Every structure is written in structure tokens, then in C-alpha cells.
Image (cartoon, rainbow, N blue to C red):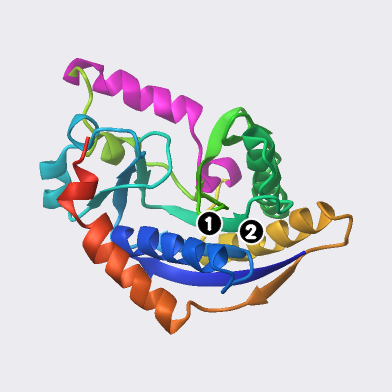
Amino acid sequence: MKLRFLETGAGTGAFNMGLDEALLESVAAGRSAPVLRLYRWEPAAVTIGYFQSMEAEVDLEACRAAGVDALRRSTGGGAVFHAAEITYSVVAPEGHPLAPADILESYRRVAGGIVEGLALLGVEAAFAPINDITAAGRKVSGNAQTRKLGCLLQHGTLLLDVDPERMFSLLRVPNEKLKGKLIEDVKARVAGLKGLLGREVGYGEAAEALRRGFAASFGRLEGGGGATLEASAPTGPELERAAALAAEKYSSPAWNLKR
């Protein structure tokens, strides 16, 4: 199995979502091989799932005051706070070994790379259907996908650390009196690598572990010893398209506030 591998570093929320969509368009048009991309968020961001209401889920005034991006994803799921984490995206045409028709199986196959990467870091983890990965009984990765233009786009996070107090300062809660309970619940259910390993894990270390984990896991899907990840960078047209999508779609109130 061969994939185009991009490690694009830090980007704004709108650019990160725009580049994921631009890469999906490239794969759909046959201009690109299937893609594995690693990246992070700068500044921090809150994203909501495609079907959610921004005004119901996010305190936009608090986000503006904190310098945190707030935007809608093209994928489903719930609100996510992106800060101390590494994010991946996978794009593959439907029918590819990473994009079988069965949605649960596609989650399982992509998640295998994260589980393998975590093992390289010394963390025993497992896929937890439908779209989570857990370690020591706590969620360490959440994932979401969409299918359009005949392709799968799946992206997800690997938490380096967890800061539920900061997260809930940006999200709306039904009752302020419940906020403390919600924070304690997240601390009990969610873990970052820092908590699991008792040490700081930087973006670079996590990215290398994920790269190796995805290569090993994806390679086994076709019975080989490992997938070939061909180092690449976004093309000029892909960057132009990503910038246009960031400006016209992912930064637009028409998109972000449409529900």
C-alpha cells in the first residue's frame, strides 16, 4: 500500500479544515494518491460537528476573548477543543482497503495506525467502537469521518494533554452549576499522553510514532510488511484551494452559524 504522507505542522482552524478538503478533492479527481496527513492547531480551536449548532455549543465571546478559533467541521460528531494534541487526516477513495463500505470497519482500519503508534510510545490502547481509542479505560483519541466525491475523509486527534477547565470555559453548558461535575467527569474519562506516561510528549515525538504506526498497521491490511508513506507537501494548487476554502467557507458565518 502506498500513501502520500504530509506533515504540515501548525495551521489555523480554517486552513486545517480547508487543506483537508482540498486534499480530498485532489484524491477524488485522481491528481493525488491516497493521503495521510499530520498537523496541529495554532491558535487553539474549538470545532463542532457538521450537524451541531455553534450558538448552542460554543461561547463565541469567550473564544474571541481567548484568541481561540471556532468553526464547523465537514465531519460529524461533537464539539472538540484542539490544543495540546496531534491531529491526523486520511483521504482514500471508496473501495480502497482504508475505505470499505462498512463504516465501523473503516474506523477500525484507520484507528489501527493510532493504536500501533501508541504502542511505540509505550501505551497499550484499543479501538473502542464506534470511533474512539482508549487506554487504561480512558479516551485518548476521538475520530470522525465523512464521505463525499467518492472518497473517505477521516480525521481525528491524539491527545498530548487534557485541560478540561479551559475547554469548558469555551463551551456552553446547560447549567453553570453542573460545570464542576462535567470537568471532573472529563478528567475521569479522558486522558492525554502526559497523564498516561507521566511525562511530556511533544508533537515531534508523537508525529514520528504515528507515522511509524500508520505505516505498520496499514501495510498489514494488504498482507505486506508495511505501507510505503511517500513524503510530500501540498502542491501550489492545493494550497490555493485550501486558502480559498479557509476564507470563503471555514471562516464564513454562513457555514459556521448555519444551524
The answer to whether 64 appears left or right of 205 in the picture is left
- Say which of 78 and 199 sits in front: 78
Local crowd size for mark 1, using a 10 Å CA cut-off: few (<14), some (14–19), many (≥20): many
Q: Position of residue 88 (x, y in %)?
A: 53, 56
Q: Work out whether mark 1 precedes mark 2 in sequence or the reverse, and give the earlier one.
A: 1
Q: Which residue is mark 1?
A: 88
The answer to whether the residue labelled 1 contacts the one labelled 2, judged by CB atoms less than 8 Å apart, is yes
Question: To which quarter of the image does residue 216 belong?
Answer: bottom right
Judging from the image, what secondary structure is the residue with disc 2 in? Answer: helix
Specify few, some or many for label 2: CA neighbours under 10 Å numbering under 14, 14-19, or 20 or more: many
Residue displayed at 62% across by 57% down: 92
Residue 182 among those drawn in magenta: yes
Disc 2 residue type (three-letter) = Leu
Q: Residue at x 72, y 55 (%)?
A: 120
Q: Which residue is mark 2?
A: 210
Is residue 189 visible in the rendered image? The answer is yes
- Verify whether residue 190 appears in magenta: yes
Q: Quadrant of the C terminus?
A: top left
> Can the viewer see residue 12?
no
Determine the CA span between mark 1 and mark 2. Answer: 9 Å
In this rendering, the answer to whether 259 lies above or below 147 is: above
Identify the amino acid type marked 1. Answer: Tyr
Split into 4 quadrants, where in the image is the N terminus? bottom right
Q: Which residues are magenta?
A: 176-197
SS of the residue at dot 1?
strand
